[in-house]
Image (spheres, helix red, strand yellow):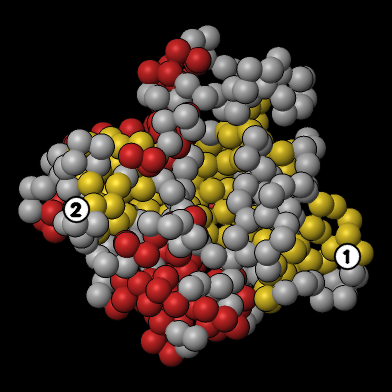
Amino acid sequence: MIRRPGRERPDWRDRLASIGLDYHSDGREPVPGGEGGLWWHEADHYELTEAEVDALDDATAALHALCLAAVDHLVRREPHRLTAEFGMSDWMADYAARSWLRGDPALMGRMDLAWDPAAGPPKMLEYNADTPTLAIETALAQWFWLEETGSGADQFNSLHEALLDGFRALAPRMGGRGMHFAAFPDAPEEWAHSTYFRDVAEQAGIPTRPIPIPEIRWNDAAGEFRDEEENRILFLHKLYPWEWVATDEFGPFFARDTAAVVEPPWKAILSHKAILPLLWRLNPGHPNLLEAYNGPAPATGEWVEKPALGREGANIRMKRDGTVTNMTGGTYGDGPVISQRRAPLYAQEGWNTVIGSWIAADRACGIIFREARSAVVRENSRVLPHLFR
């Protein structure tokens, strides 16, 4: 794996806008060698070997299987931990468990992996299993970049096809009825992704309707969710995390099961970082896992403390032998934390790299690279394409 220089397509902004990725920069002037300005960065890329792609594919599939086994173990054998360690209310814990036991289908998730091939196998940092984004960047932006640069190389990327297969598998459950796709219109990345997922669903034969999240309403007389035009919501795709639903006033209405939701309620388990200590307890020493515990870091060694429900690299504290060596700000600093042994990130030319590896339709199906000058890759860190030969 190596970071290589390349050339930007002269019309790359227009090309990205044509596929819905119009949030490719933050409006600032890019700083040479820095992170300012660009979100999408195609002047450089990552090149892998076929063997490295196989290793990422195998690791992602193995980790996904471990995660599903951990959910099953938790629901069937240790359901008390849903409230004790995952912090769920009684109704949410019951709802998530019920969702798993009846086999509610999932569509997609994205793992964040740390991998320096010289240091050992890929390691899972966390699993963005509930409201993953970077799908447009992975499935479309980097694929068109590869096609239009004429490199003749290949790419580990069948995400679009896997999403299409996933929606096709959902379609028979819906009996020709439509699905609402909910996101915040004033959040460009989320609304663009919701629009993309809606387009894929349409390709799979599912009628769809967009809806701003604030327009989802509970009709108490009818006992059902409705949209702003009073249409019943029977099937809902949401880019709104389950942990937020769980604290909303209308949240308990979901547990009445009047609407089927993608991602399903049991994904609230996988999106909670308490899954990381559970995975380590069930699979100690697994080559793709990092040692992890609930609570603050041990007093010796190099560790990363993370908010159990944190996002986008916020409120991270890195510790060495009990001393904080690095930390990030954010709004998630008041809740419980988990501690995970620090993994080496692949670093080249001062850029630290995290690999986003996708699961859709229950298979590993693509990767995307993010990089930062800082030790923690965050929400404004750059996104780069890749290829392999």
29 relative position to 81: left or right: right
Which residue is the extreme one toward the left? 175
Q: Is residue 363 visible?
A: no
Depth check: give the residue in front, 216 or 360.
216
* Corner quadrant of residue 156: top left
* Amino acid at circle 2: Leu
Q: Position of residue 20 (x, y in %)?
A: 40, 25
* Corner quadrant of residue 332: bottom right
Between the residue at mark 2 and the residue at mark 1, the CA separation in whole angstroms equals 50 Å
Give me the residue at 85% from left, 52% from top.
326
Give me the residue at 48% from left, 73% from top.
89
Give me the residue at 27% from left, 63% from top.
105
Quadrant in which the N terminus appears = top right
SS at badge 2: loop
Q: Residue 362, relative to residue 218: is it above or below? A: below
Q: Residue 118, relative to residue 350: is it above or below? A: below
55 relative position to 98: left or right: right
Residue indicated by mark 1: 320
Q: Which mark is residue 114?
A: none
Which residue is the extreme one toward the top? 10
- Mark 2 and mark 1 lie on one chain; the one further toward the N terminus is 2
Q: Position of residue 58 (x, y in %)?
A: 46, 62
Give me the residue at 39% from left, 40% from top.
214
* Corner quadrant of residue 283: bottom right
Q: Position of residue 321 (x, y in %)?
A: 90, 70
Which residue is the extreme one toward the front? 221
Q: Residue 67, relative to residue 183: is it above or below? A: below
Depth check: give the residue in front, 247 or 176.
247
Mark 2 or mark 1, whichever is nearer to me: 2
* Amino acid at circle 1: Arg
Residue indicated by mark 2: 234
SS at badge 1: strand
